[in-house]
Image (cartoon, rainbow, N blue to C red):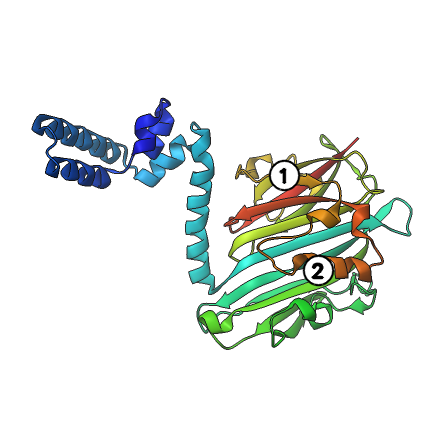
Amino acid sequence: MTRAIESNHLPSTLYFLPGPSGLRELVKAAKKTGADEAAVERSLGRIGDYEAFLRLENISRDALHAMVGDLAPEARASVVRTNAQSVHKSMSNLIGYSAEVMLTALILFPSPTPGRCELAQVSGFDGLQRHRTGAWFMTSGYGRTAGGAPLARTLDGVPTEGRGPSTLLSEYCSHPTPSFEASHSGRRHVHRLVEHEVALRSSCTFFFGERIADAYADPAEEVPGAGRLAMISSVIATPAKHLHFDVLVHRDVWRGADVRMETFRTVPHGPVDEQAIEERAPDRIELGARVQRGEHADAALPAPRLRRYGAMMREAMARLGLAPDDFRIYRCEVVYPLYGTQYAMCFRMP
């Protein structure tokens, strides 16, 4: 209420103003302290007008917040966070599991193939819990190319049938190490977390490390209407309270790139790729996500929400034969990442 009174910007006043019930409680409290009776009656009349306005327009106070959010810059972040938190709670209950932190960390470095770069990925969840017995967490990937060759490898270069036990970074998982069972459908490999407990007893942490050769062109390929563009994304398919999204780029890769964060709805058309970025413009959704850049990855690796993240990434890079100081780091952190949304770092090159 104080912020509403002090604001000299009407949309901000509307945003911070409590709802009719809260305002009535405030006026009743003022009356008990001896406030002027006429002032109390005028206030109650204005509150009635406010309530009648909401009823006439058939909107809730939450809907009013969303309407004025674009007009009140300081309110926009709160609108996004509040509504994303509501979605998180709903999807956690409906799907039956959620995580404290979702990690997506990607490392791009020169490939032996001219004009290409390799990709290594460290990904997983901290504090994933099941909320009901019928819910099963699954992770999937494509273990082989159409020609039958293994698509992914472990960080040490050993061919692997997709994201599963062979790619688990066991030292950084919870104990006992989470167990996964595999099933297959064509080239698609699905690994289901074997867990029978629920709630706090089911909480576990697991991270995968995998490597894909010649994943991207260097420099990025030309995209009609968008120039040289490469996108690296994290799609929210598991409810999480926090998204930690890092991209580490070798100093000899994608030189001079300008990096921007873009967010897209993935329903109903699926994730966006470079070739479709212009035609999928209507699917953009402004959520306020931003990229922070660090010139030296080693100094920027520590992550307050992931206690052993720095050590895990240094070990992963050592297995790849890489030195963190040869990389610049791009980081995006999001509180209550919106379920069904694609968070994309867009690298635009000269």
Q: Which residue is mark 1?
A: 261
Note whether residue 316 is visible: yes
Between 138 and 142, the residue placed more toward the observer is 138
Give above or below for 324 relative to 320. Answer: above
Q: Secondary structure at mark 1?
A: strand
Q: Using the image, determine if residue 238 lies above or below residue 80.
A: below
Q: Tell me the residue at 39%/32% (across/down).
A: 67
> Relative to 221, is 270 on the left or the right?
left
Q: Circle 2: is it few (<14), some (14-19), or many (20+) Cα within 10 Å? A: few
Which of discs 1 and 2 lies nearer the camera? The answer is 2
Residue 134 visible? The answer is no
Q: Residue 257: x, y in percent?
A: 76, 35
Q: Is residue 325 above or below residue 286?
A: below
Depth check, front residue: 57 or 61: 61
**Which residue is labeled 2 in the image?**
311
Q: Which residue shows up at 37% across the image and 28% down it?
A: 12
The amino acid at mark 1 is Met
Residue 255 image position (x, y, % from top left): 81, 37
The quarter of the picture where the N terminus appears is: top left
Q: Amino acid at mark 2?
A: Ala
